[in-house]
Each structure stands twice: as structure tokens, then as C-alpha cells.
Amino acid sequence: MSYFVRTGTRSFRPTEHCSGAWNTEEIHIAPVFGLLAHELELNRIARGRDGMRIARISFDILGVLPLEEYRTAVTVVRPGKSVELVEAVLSHADRPAVRARAWLLDVEDTAAIAGTPEPALPAPDELEPWDPTTVWAGGMLASIQVRRESVEPGHARYWLRTDHALLDGEEVSPLARAVGVLDIANGMAVRAAPEAVAYPNLDLTVHLHRDPQPGWLGFDTRVTFGAPLHAGPDEDMRALRTGIETCMMKLDDLRMRLAAPEQT
């Protein structure tokens, strides 16, 4: 079972396991992000850039994605010896649908200074299984195994994994597999029922502190809904500042820790 089937050198067809949570006639964006990460890595390898790693990927969603065939294209935007910017674009019917930009950095040994103030997550076997299809529709969410602790509405700690391949018959890296599930994060820490509020995202930015490992992927996710910019000028400015702070802290709020324990 897989999320995509390669139909040509640069063309791909989604399977039923890609169907979305908001609309089952559309693709869930998470596997698309994984596919573009895979294409970025294939491009890096093809150019002989084995000493570089993806340190950051930003994705912009340019429109809805039907369950139809897609094409990809990869371009080096900013070449360099130790830093590169590379872009991958997924297109449907000759129209760009998703754009990914990745910064690649030269690999250095930072083991002597590695560390984080983030607290450790409970291990997967310490958390209860949770079925995301009790809240969400679609083949993508049905394909995910989750062990979760709901702290409060909009905040959850959990581990997830999938037995589905990203691409049929093709080996992909742990990074591409991890990126291929990141976009389900806010759906695991539900702040409001999807029947009451629609909040599909337009973008995602991923900063990588180290290479993800195979197996369970751990998350500490916090979901924030901002206030509208209405009322008087003073109230508007306070809301604007709050909105900017929320955007700047988006990655901290989601705190998607790319970590996996020994057990699988």
C-alpha cells in the first residue's frame, strides 16, 4: 500500500490512501509534502551533493488538489559550495499547485554541542492508542497509527507512524517519510470540531535539527486560533501584534519534534 504511484520520470498518481480529511475528493497535503521532499533529495543525490543535508523546507499551497495525476520539477535557485536553495514544484494540468523551497547546508559534526531544553515526550507504549477517524475522514488519516495524550483542547502529545509507503516500489529516506506526515499535526490536537470550524492551512515550514529516524514520530502540538482584526484602532493593533507573535511562534506552538525511540 502506498500514497503515490510513479507514472513517469516526473509524474505521479495519488492512491485512495491520499484522500483528504476536509474533502475526500481531494488529496491530503501531507503526503504531497513528503513527495516533494523526496524529489528534493533525489535532486541532491543526482547532483553529487552527498555532503549536504536539508535544514529547512517551506511549503506553499497554491490551490486545491484533486485526486488526479501530477508532475514535479526541481530547480536550483541559489547554488553554492556550503549553502544551497533548491525549489520543487508540484503541478496539476500545467498549473503550479504546491511550491517547496529547501535550504541545504554542508554537514558538520555538532555532537559536542548538541542539546535542547525541550522536555522529553512519554514513550509510545506509555500512551493510549487513538483512532483519528473518530474525528476526521479520508484515507490518509485512516492509514495512520496514533498513540496520544490529549492535554487540553488544542494541545496534545503523541506519537504516530504509518505502514504505507510514500511511493510504490521506491525507497525513500526517513526525512521524506517524516515530512509526509507532518501536516496532520493540528488534526491530532483538535481545538474545535471540524464540523464547526474549517481551518485548512496554506503553508508549512519545517526546521530540521537532525536527521529523522525510522519508526514512531513524536509531537508536542499546540493549536492557536487568532482573533479577527475588528473593533477600534487600539484593539486592532493589539490583535495585530498578537497575530504576528502567533505567526512567529508557529513552529514553537506546533513543536514537531522529529524524534523516534528504539522500539517500533
Image: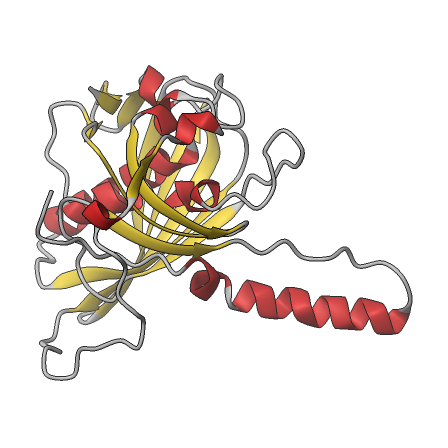
Q: Is residue 103 visible?
A: no
Percent x, y of residue 262: 8, 52
Quadrant in which the N terminus appears: top left
In the picture provided, is 237 more to the left or to the right than 203?
right
The answer to whether residue 72 is above or below residue 185 is above
Quadrant in which the C terminus appears: top left
Q: Is residue 186 visible?
A: yes
Percent x, y of residue 109: 9, 76
Judging depth in this view, the residue of 168 and 227 nearest the camera is 227
Question: Outermost residue, right direction?
Answer: 232
Q: Which residue occupies 53% across, 27% down? A: 22
Q: Which residue occupies 17% across, 53% down? A: 260
Q: Which residue occupies 14% across, 52% down? A: 213
Residue 255, located in which quarter of the rendered image? bottom left
The answer to whether residue 82 is above or below residue 218 is below
Percent x, y of residue 135: 49, 29
State the count of labels.
0
In the picture provided, is 46 more to the left or to the right than 249?
left
Judging depth in this view, the residue of 235 and 43 nearest the camera is 235
In the picture provided, is 148 more to the left or to the right than 233?
left
Percent x, y of residue 214: 13, 46
The answer to whether residue 184 is above or below residue 167 is below
